[in-house]
Amino acid sequence: MIKTHILTCPICDKTLRREGGFYEIKKTCSNKHHVFVMNFNDWDTLLSVSLMAKALRGNKFIWDFQQKTLRVERIDGKSSHELPWFEPDFYLYEKLIQKLNVYVTFS
């Protein structure tokens, strides 16, 4: 389960940058290895998480926690499709990257 109150990136432990307006809040970590974004509503309910990383070979993964869907999109915009849902554990980053790459390979 992803904690909504976290202040640091679960991948690299850097402080998350908080942005947002009245209805949506984003917590973001962006560095040369990954871009991690958490989206919340104004009641601090986690809506979605997206992850782009060099290790994901040009793919962006988006977990929609409201619909329980996982979507992979090519960063170049050439394709997008759904994958089987699972709850990500960003604290076990290497294992997660391996799992996502296997999903993409066999989807």
Image (cartoon, rainbow, N blue to C red):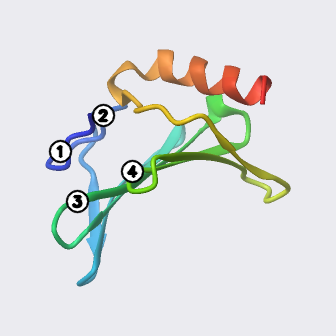
Question: Which badge, 4 or 3, comes first in the chain's sequence?
Answer: 3
Amino acid type assigned to the residue bearing label 1 in the image: Ile
> Tag 3: Cα neighbours inside 10 Å, few (<14), some, or many (≥20)?
some
In which quadrant will I find the C terminus? top right
- Choose top left, top right, bottom left or bottom right for residue 58: top right
> Tag 4: Cα neighbours inside 10 Å, few (<14), some, or many (≥20)?
some
- Residue topped by disc 4: 65
Q: CA distance from mark 4 to mark 3?
A: 9 Å
- Residue topped by disc 2: 10
The percent position of residue 106, horizontal first and vertical second, equals 78, 23
Amino acid type assigned to the residue bearing label 2 in the image: Pro
Q: CA distance from mark 2 to mark 4?
A: 17 Å
The residue under the point 27% across, 51% down is 16
Q: CA distance from mark 1 to mark 3?
A: 13 Å
Considering only vertical position in the picture, is 100 above or below 92?
below
The percent position of residue 4, horizontal first and vertical second, equals 20, 49
The residue under the point 38% across, 56% down is 66
Q: Nearer the viewer, mark 2 or mark 4?
A: 4
**Label 2 close to label 4 by CB (< 8 Å):** no
- Numbered tag placed on residue 6 in the rendering: 1
Q: Nearer the viewer, mark 4 or mark 1?
A: 4
- Numbered tag placed on residue 45 in the rendering: 3
The residue under the point 41% across, 55% down is 48
Q: Nearer the viewer, mark 3 or mark 2?
A: 3
Amino acid type assigned to the residue bearing label 4 in the image: Phe
**Label 4 close to label 3 by CB (< 8 Å):** no
Considering only vertical position in the picture, is 1 above or below 67?
above
Helix, strand or loop under label 2: loop
